[in-house]
Amino acid sequence: MISRVDLRGRCAADARDLLPRASLGVDEALEMVRPLVDDVRRRGAAAVRELTNRFDGVDRATTRVPDSELTGALERLEPRLRAALEEAARRARLVHEAQRRSDVTVEVAPGARVTERWVPVRRVGLYVPGGLVPLPSSVVMNVVPAQVAGVGSVALASPPRPEWGDLPHPVVLATAALLGVDEVHAAGGAQAVAMFAWGTEDCPRVDLVTGPGNVYVTSAKRLLRGVVGIDSEAGTTEIAILADDSADPAYVAADLVAQAEHDPKAGCLLITPSPQLVDLVEAELARQVPGTRHRERVEAALAGQAAHVLVDDLDQGLTVVDDWAPEHLEVLTRDAATWAARVSNAGAVFVGPWSPVSLGDYVAGSNHVLPTGGTARHTGGLSVQSFLHSLHVVDYSRDALAAAAPFVDALGGAEDLAAHVAAVRTRVPR
C-alpha cells in the first residue's frame, strides 16, 4: 500500500529530494493562479463573482454573508458540537494569551531610550477551507489568536457550495458567530486571497491573510506576499512519525489514516530503524483502511505521497525529519520527550502515544494552522505573534544625542553620508 524508501547507509540530507510530497507544488500552481489574482486586482467583486461561479458553482450578487444567516446558523448549532467548540476555543485562548508580548524599554546610555512596542495589525483576512470537509476548528485556530492580539477588524472567507444554500458550510458560519466574527464572505480559493489583498466593493482590503488551504490558496498567498502580509504557506497537510520498535503499530497506522483522510494529496511518512515495525504497520493498514469512512481518499494519499522510510538509527531519523520539515511530527519512541526536544524543523511536535495529531487538530490548545511543504525549516505556525508587528520608539535627550554625535561623525564619514552627520550636528554643534 505504501512505498518503502531505504536510507540506511545513505546520507540523510538527501531526504528532501527522495521523500514524497504532493505532486503539484506551489511553484507549478503559481502560473495557474496568477491570471486569477490579476483578474481580481483589475475587476474586483465582478471577478470574484465569476470565479466563484466557475469553481464553486455559486453565483452571488455579493460575497458578504448576511448577519441573519450567521445568527440562524448559531441558533441551529447542535449543543454537543457547540460545547466542543467552546472548549476548543477556551484551551486555545489559554495557550495564545501566554504568547502576548509586553512592550520593553531599554536605556542604551544615560537619557537614551529605545522602546519596542508590539502593535496588532489593523485588519486581517482569515481563510477557512471548505473543500472536502467543513473545518470549524480552523475558524477557532484563526480567530482566537487574532482576538488575543487585539486585531481591530476581522474578516473571514470560506468557499460556498450550492448544497449549503450558496453559502459557506453552516457550521463554519455558526462558529464564526459563536466567536463574535460578524464579517464573513462566501469566497474561496485563490480569488478569496486576492479579494483580501486587493480589496473589492464587498470587502475592504486587509493587512494580513492567515489560514490553511489547498495548493492554489497557498500559491496565491506566496504570489501576493508583499502586497499583503501572510502567516505561512499552510497548504496540503502532512505528517511524519518518528518511531522505534516500541511503538504500537495500531497507533501508527491509525495516525497515518487520520492524516490521509484530510486530502488525497496528504503526505504521510513513517520514519523508523525497525523493519519489523514497518511490517506490522502494513498489516494494521490492511486491517484499518477498508473500514475507514473516507477509504478512497485515504488510499489515494497512501499510494501517492506516503512512504515507510528505513533509517540506520533514530539519530539518522531525526536528521531526515529536520530535512523534510513536516507540518506535523509524532515521536513514538522510548524516551520520546528527549528525542522530541532535539527536533528543529516541524510545525508542531506530538510527544508519545497519548498525544496524537488529531488532538492538536481540535482541543490540544496548540494551533493547527502550520507550515507545510518543508517551510517549517524557517517558518512557525499561526500564533499571536502572527498578528503583531514590532515598532521601535527612539527617545533621546539633548545630552544623550551630544554623547552619541562623535559616533555618528565617524560612521557617517565612513559611509560618505555628510547630510546624516549634519542632521545631528545642526542640533549639537561640535
Image: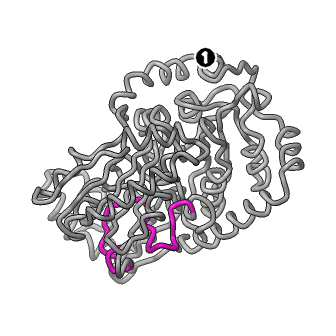
Quadrant where the N terminus lies? top left
Q: Amino acid at mark 1?
A: Arg
Q: Residues within 10 Å of mark 1 (few under 14, many from 20)?
A: few
- Judge whether residue 227 can be spotted in this image: no
Left or right: where 320 falls relative to 182: left
Q: Quadrant of the rendered structure where residue 252 is?
A: bottom left
* Percent x, y of residue 69: 84, 38
Does 347 appear in magenta?
yes
User: Residue at left 40%, top 62%?
Assistant: 329
Is 151 situated above or below 397? above
Is 326 situated above or below 100? above
Is 36 situated above or below 275? above
From the viewer's side, name the closer residue of 207 and 330. Answer: 330
Q: Quadrant of the rendered structure where residue 361 is?
A: bottom right
Left or right: where 147 falls relative to 246: right
* Percent x, y of residue 314: 24, 70
Left or right: where 200 falls relative to 72: left
Q: How many marks?
A: 1
* Percent x, y of residue 88: 68, 64
From the viewer's side, name the closer residue of 252 and 344. Answer: 252
- Judge whether residue 310 can be spotted in this image: yes
Task: Tell me which segment is drawn in magenta.
Answer: 337-358
Residue hosting label 1: 54
User: Residue at left 54%, top 17%?
Assistant: 42
* Percent x, y of residue 102: 53, 74
Query: Under tag 1, what secondary structure?
Result: helix
